[in-house]
Amino acid sequence: MGQNQLGLSPAEAWQPLPAAEWNNAAARHLLQRVGFSAPPLELARVLRDGPADTLERYFAKMPAFPQPHTIAELQADGPDIYRRLQTLPPEERRMAQREAQEQSREALFDMSIKWLQLASRLENSPAEKWLLFFSDVWVISVDKVKNSALVYQHQDLLRDLALGNAVNLAKCMSRSPAMVVYLDLQQSRQEAPNENFARELFELFTLGGGNYTENDIKQAARAFTGYRLRAGEFLYARRQHDNGVKTFFGESG
């Protein structure tokens, strides 16, 4: 089995570190794993406080990330843009769509810079690295979502729930407008369930390969029918939902 810089096997690394082994190397290792760096002053404090108090301090709450003004403007204009596009002639509609996409790209750049500034602050780094991990699990694609306001909203949902209950997180992620777009829940209908979200829910988001069957995916996909967006907001379309009995993992309902 592989070992880390402290000489621990994976099995040993899951065990509490004996107090006698809490030293400068262990404190530096902790800082570099939960954050991005191990500056001398912080290293001294962590060495003094110990691992439990240090982690409690770092993960007491998620740092606030105020909505960048460019995202706020994009979100405020969102419903009007959706309505206005439908009333325009084809050529004007294409020009307006290109303009909206450029505005969205600028807003995404602004959000990215402000997040890097937030995450670079030592007191925020561990929580923001945790958020980054969740963003790689409950992943979306900017290229497909094509709306920076929805990207911000998705990240904000993760921020609100990243230190809480995993079941609540999964439920909220299924209703994230960005996720609805990314994994094609909008195309999932009672008569033709789309399996993309159900497959990723099991394979990537929660269980991992080998812990479910193809039938589990098909049955779960039926449960997520009727998820829609309207003017950038989640909407449950009751008439598009499959209300029939579904059976997966040996349970029916």
Image (cartoon, rainbow, N blue to C red):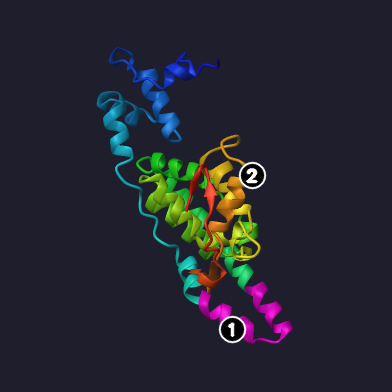
Q: Nearer the viewer, residue 193 or 173?
A: 193
Residue 241 lies, in percent from the top left, at 54, 66
Q: Is residue 92 magenta?
A: yes
Residue 149 lies, in percent from the top left, at 51, 65
* Amino acid under disc 1: Arg
Other-residue count near label 2 (Cα within 10 Å), few / some / many at <14 / 14–19 / ≥20: few
Reading the chain from its start, which is encountered first: label 2 or label 1?
1
Q: Does the magenta stretch include residue 88?
A: yes
* Amino acid under disc 2: Glu
Under tag 2, what secondary structure? helix
Give the residue at x 66% y 74%.
97
Nearest to the eye among marks 2 and 1: give it. 2
Give the residue at x 56% y 78%.
81
Instruction: Give the total number of marks visible in the rendering.
Output: 2
Other-residue count near label 1 (Cα within 10 Å), few / some / many at <14 / 14–19 / ≥20: few
Q: Is residue 199 visible?
A: no
What label does residue 214 carry, if any?
A: 2
Quadrant housing residue 98: bottom right
Residue 55 lies, in percent from the top left, at 32, 33
Q: Can residue 81 be seen in this view?
A: yes
Under tag 1, what secondary structure? helix
Give the residue at x 60% y 34%.
210
Give the residue at x 55% y 17%.
2
Asked if residue 156 is positioned above or below residue 91 in the image, the reply reads above
- For the residues labelled 2 and 1, the Cα–Cα distance comes to 42 Å
The residue wearing badge 1 is 84
CB-based contact (under 8 Å), mark 2 and mark 1:
no
Q: Nearer the viewer, residue 19 or 28?
A: 19
Magenta stretch, main secondary structure, is helix
The segment highlighted magenta reads 78-99
Left or right: where does residue 228 sit relative to residue 117? right
Residue 46 lies, in percent from the top left, at 31, 28
